[in-house]
Image (spheres, rainbow, N blue to C red):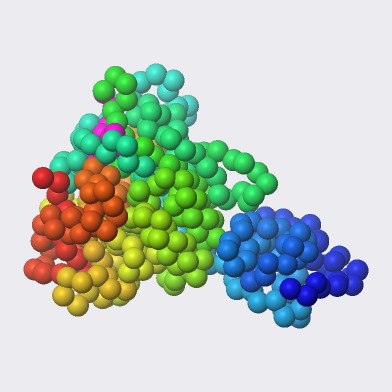
Amino acid sequence: MKKLIFPLIVIAILSVTLVSATPTNPGIIRVFVHSDNPIIRGLLDVQHEFPNGFSAKVSEAQLGLLNVLGIETEQVQLYHVTGRPTCNDNGVCEPELGENPSCGDCKPSEEEPPANRTCYPDNQMPWGILRVNGGSGGADIDVAILDTGVYREHLDLTRRIEQCKDFTMGPRVKGSCKDIHGHGTHVAGTVAADGGEDGLGIFGVAPEADILAYKVCGSDGYCWTDDVAAGIRYAATHGAEIISISLGGDSQSSLIKDAIDFAVSKGALLVAAAGNTGPSEGSILYPAANVKVIAVGAINSAENVASWSSRGVNDGDYIIEEKEVEFGAPGVSIESTYINGCYGYKGGTSMAAPHISGLAAKLWQGNAADTRTYLQSIAKDIWTAGDDSATGFGLPIAP
């Protein structure tokens, strides 16, 4: 490629020091830069490298200059976790991402996580785990959980965490997978909580599976799609058989789409939450709407679909296509591990997806395609008869 020669003014503008991009800081823009030029890369606040370019935080002036130079850019999208409103550690009901609060009675939790067991779950085998016949298996299967991080010291998770990475800090800061929000820790428990060494804690669907805890969302529950895409790619190249994604957005991210294609080529099975924007037909979010991803809607203990669970555009032919829901799974009043070292209840398709991720680990058939087909074959038809827009094939139940 012909080497570009930059005037001093160009270098000065491109190399300006940036502050962190956030949803409330519109002056900084997060973009994907379609360029492999090392000079441009060296002058920008690069977040992640990809095969056909890199993501970066830029000012409006920098973005304008890149456009003047003829360098193609596209804005990085912002997704969010798909949990419903929940009680925080102070006992306050927090609506997640603009939804109306509906937590019920909130009680303050312990301020400090217990060093030893000082709290116990209401149910060691929550209703969702029982409903899918989980609570055992998953040995030697790695499940990557892309979320707000995981509280790795939880007594019921500490033996399950195999990897812990933070993708929200860019390439220069090697963070942990510390979970400040609580969403990711709850998801992880549903997948693989093992009851702790004393056997008195809570159990997930596949308590012998290993967790690859990848933090791709911030403490506010928002998730930049370049962080998510980087997490998917990393999972696919570091041994993940299953990638569990309880987050989403209204439109498809090109970065995540390419990462999904890459992960599938590496043999990974991807599972994602359908979203909480129902009941309109076609309200399913991406990446669940991607045909290569298992999309999961939420049901309650009576096996009725939650009104807020996003719907697909299923045409009833039992052939998964773009924007179709594949399964329904427990996603209402789900008890699981929490960041105070104890337990909490959450609802949302975020809670439904890890039931299917755990089942995939428990029932792994040697490869992703056969596992997906097997889950379809054991699904119990629920809600309305046939391949419906809220539960697709139905509720998979382990034999």
On screen, residue 69 above or below 151:
below
Residue 25: x and y in percent read 65, 62
Please determine whether, in this image, residue 44 is positioned above or below residue 4. Answer: above
Horizontal relation, residue 35 to residue 68: left or right? left
Q: State the quadrant of the C terminus.
A: top left
Q: Position of residue 42 (x, y in %)?
A: 76, 59
Q: Nearer the viewer, residue 267 or 272?
A: 267
Q: Residue at x 38, y 28 (%)?
A: 159
Left or right, residue 187 beside residue 124: right
Which of the 4 image quarters holds residue 82?
bottom left
Q: 225 and 29: which one is in front?
A: 225
Dominant SS of magenta comes to loop
Picture coordinates of residue 206, whole percent (x, y):
26, 39
Q: Residue at x 26, y 23 (%)?
A: 200
In the rendered view, tell whether residue 196 sits above or below residue 78.
above
* Residue 183 counted in the magenta span: no
Q: Look at 67% across and 61% down and name the residue there.
A: 57
Q: Residue at x 29, y 19 (%)?
A: 198
Q: How many discs mark residues in the rendered view?
A: 0
Q: Nearer the viewer, residue 315 or 249?
A: 315
Res 341 quadrant in image: top left
Residue 10 x/y as whole percent: 85, 71
Q: Is residue 302 visible?
A: yes
Please name whichever residue, 32 or 97, is drawn nearer the observer in this view of the structure: 32
Q: Is residue 39 left or right of residue 307?
A: right
Magenta span of residues = 200-209
Any part of residue 341 in sight: no
Q: Which quadrant of the rendered structure holds the N terminus? A: bottom right
Q: Quadrant of residue 271?
A: bottom left
- Residue farthest to the front, as pictured: 1
